[in-house]
Image: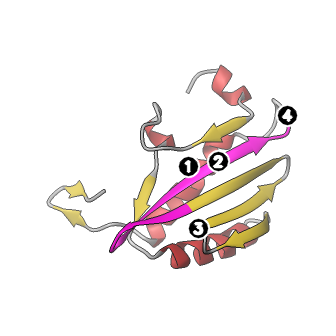
Amino acid sequence: MGVFDKFQTHIQTDDSHKQEALRTRYYAASPNAVLKWLEETIKREGQTVRRVDADRGELAFQGDGWDALATVIQVDGGRTAVDFTLNRDSRFGPDLRQIVVTYYEALQQKFPLRAIGNKTVE
């Protein structure tokens, strides 16, 4: 991550992001299970859940000086994709990348995909 990345006021994960840490992640759970777990975890972290729309697979939340949208979509029978979009109010403030990485790691602990051989199924 470069020096200028710390001043970004917007981060969005996707399948082809140049930084591996900010690529879409996949988990072994239903979208509803992921949304419910995210909602509980976000509240436990002291952040505010503003809206949960299970039909659209969206969860909007905010922290101190930033807001975010988690998008949760079932890709196939046992695999759910999770993407984040984060916006910060000013150039200075919390590291948006670290917020994304923290949630992705926690989701991986809770809903890991099974491995085949030495490769993870994604």
Amino acid type, mark 1:
Val
Q: Quadrant of the N terminus?
A: top right
Amino acid type, mark 3:
Gly
Q: Earlier in the sequence, mark 1 or mark 3?
A: 3
Q: CA distance from mark 2 to mark 4?
A: 16 Å
Quarter assignment of residue 97: top right
Quarter assignment of residue 75: bottom left
Q: Earlier in the sequence, mark 1 or mark 2?
A: 2
Q: Earlier in the sequence, mark 3 or mark 2?
A: 3
- Numbered label attached to residue 101: 1
What residue range appears in magenta?
72-89
For the residues bearing labels 4 and 1, Cβ distance under 8 angstroms? no
Quarter assignment of residue 103: bottom right
Magenta segment's dominant SS is strand
The residue to which callout 2 is attached is 85
| Residue 116 placement, left or right of 99 | left
